[in-house]
Amino acid sequence: MNTTGRHLTPFVALEAATALSGAANGVSMVAFPWLVLELTGSASYAAAIGAITLVPLLLTSLLSGTLVDILGRRCVSVVSDLLSLVSVAAIPILSGLVGLSFALLAVLAVIGAFFDPAGITARESMLPEAARAAGLELERANGMHEAIWGVAYLVGPGVGGLLIAVVGATNAFWATAALFAVSAGLMFAVRIPGAARPAMHGKLREFWPATKEGLVFLWREPVLRSVAIVTALVVGFWLPIQGVLLPVYFEARQEPGHLGVVLMAISAGAVIGALAYAAVGARFPRRRALNASLLGSALAVLGMAFLPPLAALLAFGFVAGVAYGPINPISNVALQERTPNRLRGRVLGLSTSIAYAAGPAGYLLVGPLIDKLGVRGAFLLLAGGLVVVAVASFAVRGFKGLDDVTGRDVGSIM
């Protein structure tokens, strides 16, 4: 297939928008709690900013896919970025006009969290058509997409820290607004089949029946149901490890720098794992690749759970990230191939919401586990849970269809 710049442009624009939006969120992840600390001096308030965004993330992930299918992928992506722009630009504007408070920042953080999942879902829904235009296999396109998203979240917090040092936490949000603006402009310029509002779209008053239709399809499709459930279980064990166990461990040792490098090792490994799958993933059966990724990451996390010296912890964390890297690309490819085009947005959004629901559930459980078993005991229990899920995945019947050619949208594979 001809892969001139004209055909590559939609994919490049889509991934550039993904990188910019991800980096903007990465900056906000650092700037929001920093600004709260400056205003209140309370670490509890700073942590609360992150916690209060979980509910809107879950809710909008559940609903955003239906909006994508009804209003159109490009429209939702552009509007999502513009509304995110407004929510972050309001911080320096209101700071100059009326001053900031924790309550006001909390409201703006919630508003921003409402819009992000819609943009993410819209862009991922456009990926198969952009890959087709560029002559890319779905495995390669999805691996690159996940790697770019991971790099954005690696770079974003670092840029955020630099901006805080140079211009201050409040003014750092101007840079975030600019990133969202460029992302919106790129997505407005993307012209590929399926990006505009579907000819056979539903109506907003039919929102709930349309959402239910996507949920019924997801539950009755054995491959996608199995992938969604297993992925949710993995996320439920993984997030408390990164978000609670490791911070508690290093905080007790007064080693915040070590926490940072361990988390960076995991993230860097995940980026490399996604890129490796982009390069060679199409050569391997997806079921075996998914089973191997689940087991490899679980065993590496089990090594971390013994809390070895820093060098070993870094090595285990990096290996865990590399092994985890292909999981999301494989899941995405399965969804893109097995979901009818008109349902793609809502099925993608519903799958994401299931994973978002698992994370908070894990957070609720890990605190009492640490109190009762200590950090190492809780870590071993969660790592053991990951191993059980990974081993059980070899017996999941639904995974057999991952390599079923008859279930694929063959026209999307080039």
Image (spheres, rainbow, N blue to C red):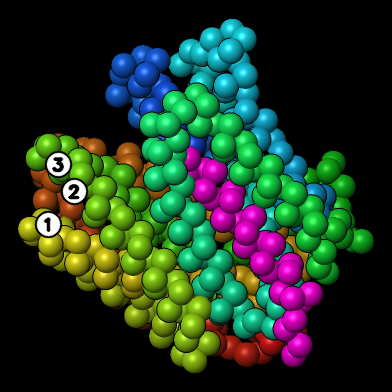
Label 3 sits on what residue type?
Answer: Glu
Whole-number angstrom distance, CA of label 2 to CA of label 3: 5 Å
Give the structural element (helix, strand or loop) at label 3.
loop
Give the structural element (helix, strand or loop) at label 1.
helix
Label 2 sits on what residue type?
Answer: His
Main SS of the magenta part reads: helix
Whether pointer 2 and pointer 3 mark residues with C-beta atoms closer than 8 Å, the reply is yes
Residue 156 at x, y percent in the picture: 46, 47
Number of residues whose C-alpha sits closer than 10 Å to that of mark 2, classed few (under 14), some (14–19) or many (20 or more): some
Number of residues whose C-alpha sits closer than 10 Å to that of mark 1, classed few (under 14), some (14–19) or many (20 or more): some
Label 1 sits on what residue type?
Answer: Leu
Q: Which residue is mark 1?
A: 310
Q: Nearer the viewer, residue 97 or 341?
A: 97
User: Which of disc 3 and disc 1 is earlier in sequence?
Assistant: 3
Q: Splitting the image into 4 quarters, where does residue 193 fall? A: bottom right
Residue drawn at (68%, 69%), measured in percent from left and top?
A: 11
Q: Is residue 90 magenta?
A: no
Question: For this view, does 189 lie left or right of residue 109?
Answer: right
Question: For this view, does 393 lie left or right of residue 54?
Answer: left
**Total of numbered circles in the picture?**
3
Whole-number angstrom distance, CA of label 1 to CA of label 3: 11 Å
Residue drawn at (10%, 43%), measured in percent from left and top?
A: 374
Q: Which residue is mark 2?
A: 258
What's the magenta region?
Answer: 1-27
Give the structural element (helix, strand or loop) at label 2.
helix
Whether pointer 1 and pointer 2 mark residues with C-beta atoms closer than 8 Å, the reply is yes
Residue 95 at x, y percent in the picture: 55, 15
Question: For this view, does 126 lie left or right of residue 104?
Answer: right
Q: Which residue is mark 3?
A: 255
Whole-number angstrom distance, CA of label 1 to CA of label 2: 8 Å
Q: Splitting the image into 4 quarters, where does residue 405 fall? A: bottom right
User: Which of disc 2 and disc 1 is earlier in sequence?
Assistant: 2
